[in-house]
Image (cartoon, rainbow, N blue to C red):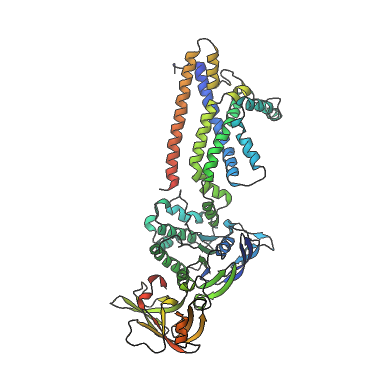
């Protein structure tokens, strides 16, 4: 595609990759946390709830800085990860982590709502029919919350595509390595004559966001129809 | 098979303390709201952990608080028919029916799917989703689902309460068939005397968390001292056999030699039926009534008179056909000088016996 220059193109592909992995890796944990918050009573539940929602209310720069402190090569977790060969700081994987952390609260909120909408009496019925907890989740709860999972995943994807503050703080803005769509737009706007490139990327952002939204609507509606049983 | 339950449990205002054993067939936990019947059935199902108690089915202990033994619900192998059906909305009727089979142990005695589907008449519904079923259809599928899970015991918590009269009449015969055709014992919660009279092999009557009466349906419902859900619901049960269907729309029954005429019953000639005769529909006469429109006249001896707190009294009468209860005014009891051992005639109008009072 000639319309986008190589640098712009790189940013688009990198953003898609970052958002894809941020969403995919966040899904299992997101479902687990949403289920725990919706269904279980345990000490520290409010603290967990607070931690999950923290990235939503903290300034993104603060989240990015905390990530750098923790997952940077000199941070406690980052140092350990480096020893086993995983480096996050200033890599696209770090961008995915930052995007994932920022998108996590949105994902969990959508899923938690759909889990709370499942009647526990149906899960009881499944138990009396011989299904263990894990099987109940796989055969009753999971299919019924699928629309919520889809909504949560798409919301998270869109958020991850647009994440800027935490990403640029944690992994900087290295073209071809960590320069995502928003940071590329920001970079183009800093240099004279970059407005056209920025404009093109803005258009791409809008199209991707709209497409994601439409896709989630269609998918959620189709699944809801299957699940709703009408 | 034997279900043995002994429970102590506190739940809000209810202080449950019960102990009973259920023989094969259908055992009804009978009582008003707050009597603890749902708490008991949920403890048997494992959906509620009792403070203290022991529950065993056919020698297999499901729960014993003294031994700290507790089987989770999914390992109890029960079939639970809930009041609201609780079908899985995301699965088809066929998948709902198979749900229990997926988890039943391989060596469990397996009900034949075709037989159950035929018995419940749900063949045409198999590919539908629960959302597209009527209340009665949902409940039939729920019965099938419970039955197909190869249960050791079937539990039913007021499975007809959410249905209107017509749907109730549609489902009741399936429970009768279940009771008569399957070896699986049934524990059934109900507050309806008519349902109890039709279905119960054994009645465990509950009041305020205690067992107040326990015995066969004939025994318990024929006891004039037993008025669990108000005097209007009192009525004894008579066991009879269909001997003929007449052209004028009546069916003739034989109850140990006595003839009974009822509005046409669906059962075939020779089939055993149970007839509930509501006490308030029975009239007593000191002499054999002549020139009277009522078709059913049973001669009997008064065994007990229970005067109520209000204007009424309940007279229990031993007739050839069995125990009959009559609800009269205390004024009539005095005017007729009714007393124990007196011979009287019970008069029952044919049309006062409703179809829901007659069961197979």
Q: Where does residue B314 sit, x and y in percent of width and height?
A: 48, 79
Q: Where does residue B225 sit, x and y in percent of width and height?
A: 53, 78
Residue sitting farthest toward the top: A192
Give me the residue at 38% from left, 72% from top.
Answer: B354
**Which is more toward the observer, B26 or B136?**
B136
Residue B296, picture quadrant: bottom left
- Residue A85 seen in the figure: no
Q: Where does residue A91 sit, x and y in percent of width and height?
A: 61, 23
- Residue A223 seen in the figure: yes
Relative to residue B171, is residue B249 depicted above or below? below
**Which is more toward the observer, A44 or A70?**
A44
Relative to residue B82, is residue B300 depicted above or below? below
Image check: B12 left or right of B236? right
Q: Where does residue B9 sit, x and y in percent of width and height?
A: 63, 62
Q: How many marks?
A: 0
For the N terminus of chain A, give its image quadrant: top left
Residue B326, picture quadrant: bottom left
Image check: B286 left or right of A165? left
Image check: B252 left or right of A7? left
Relative to residue A157, is residue B305 depicted above or below? below
**Which is more toward the observer, B33 or A112?**
B33
């Amino acid at each position: 595609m000639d319309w986008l220059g190589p640098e712009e193109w790189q940013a688009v592909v990198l953003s898609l990759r970052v958002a894809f992995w941020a969403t995919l890796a966040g899904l299992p944990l997101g479902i687990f946390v949403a289920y725990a918050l919706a269904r279980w009573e345990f000490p520290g539940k409010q603290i967990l709830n607070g931690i999950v929602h923290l990235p939503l209310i903290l300034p993104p720069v603060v989240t990015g800085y905390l990530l750098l402190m923790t997952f940077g090569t000199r941070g406690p977790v980052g140092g350990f990860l480096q020893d086993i060969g995983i480096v996050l700081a200033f890599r696209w994987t770090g961008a995915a982590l930052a995007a994932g952390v920022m998108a996590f609260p949105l994902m969990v909120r959508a899923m938690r709502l759909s889990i709370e909408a499942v009647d526990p009496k149906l899960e009881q019925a499944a138990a009396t029919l011989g299904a263990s907890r894990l099987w109940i989740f796989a055969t009753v709860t999971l299919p019924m919350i699928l629309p919520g999972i889809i909504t949560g995943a798409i919301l998270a994807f869109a958020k991850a595509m647009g994440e800027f503050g935490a990403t640029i703080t944690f992994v900087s803005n290295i073209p071809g390595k960590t320069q995502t769509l928003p940071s590329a737009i920001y970079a183009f706007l800093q240099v004279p004559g970059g407005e056209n490139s920025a404009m093109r990327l803005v258009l791409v952002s809008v199209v991707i966001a709209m497409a994601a939204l439409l896709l989630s609507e269609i998918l959620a509606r189709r699944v809801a129809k299957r699940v709703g049983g009408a | 098979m034997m279900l043995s339950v002994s429970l102590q449990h506190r739940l809000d205002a209810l202080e449950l303390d019960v102990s009973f054993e259920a023989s094969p067939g259908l055992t009804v936990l009978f009582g008003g709201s707050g009597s603890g019947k749902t708490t008991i059935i949920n403890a048997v199902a494992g959906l509620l952990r009792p403070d203290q108690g022991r529950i065993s089915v056919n020698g297999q202990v499901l729960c014993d608080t003294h031994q700290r033994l507790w089987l989770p619900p999914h390992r109890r192998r029960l079939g639970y028919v809930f009041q609201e059906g609780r079908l899985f909305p995301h699965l088809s009727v066929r998948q709902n029916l198979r749900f229990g089979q997926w988890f039943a142990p391989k060596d469990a005695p397996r009900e034949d799917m075709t037989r159950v589907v035929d018995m419940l008449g749900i063949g045409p519904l198999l590919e539908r989703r629960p959302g597209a079923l009527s209340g009665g259809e949902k409940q039939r599928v729920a019965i099938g689902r419970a039955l197909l899970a190869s249960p050791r015991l079937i539990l039913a918590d007021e499975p007809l309460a959410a249905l209107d009269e017509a749907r109730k009449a549609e489902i009741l015969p399936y429970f009768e068939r279940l009771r008569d055709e399957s070896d699986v014992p049934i524990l059934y919660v109900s507050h309806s005397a008519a349902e109890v009279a039709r279905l119960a092999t054994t009645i465990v009557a509950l009041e305020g968390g205690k067992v107040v009466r326990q015995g066969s349906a004939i025994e318990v419902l024929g006891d004039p001292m037993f008025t669990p859900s108000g005097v209007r619901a009192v009525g004894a049960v008579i066991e009879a056999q269909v001997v003929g269907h007449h052209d004028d729309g009546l069916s003739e029954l034989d109850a140990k030699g006595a003839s009974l005429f009822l509005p046409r019953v669906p059962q075939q000639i020779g089939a055993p039926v149970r007839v509930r005769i509501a006490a308030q529909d029975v009239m007593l006469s000191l002499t054999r009534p002549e020139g009277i429109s009522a078709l059913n006249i049973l001669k009997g001896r008064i065994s007990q008179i229970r005067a109520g707190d209000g204007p009424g009294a309940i007279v229990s009468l031993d007739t050839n056909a069995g125990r009959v209860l009559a609800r009269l005014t205390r004024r009539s009891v005095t005017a007729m000088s009714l007393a124990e051992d007196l011979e009287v005639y019970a008069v029952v109008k044919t049309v006062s016996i409703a179809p829901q009072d007659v069961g197979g």
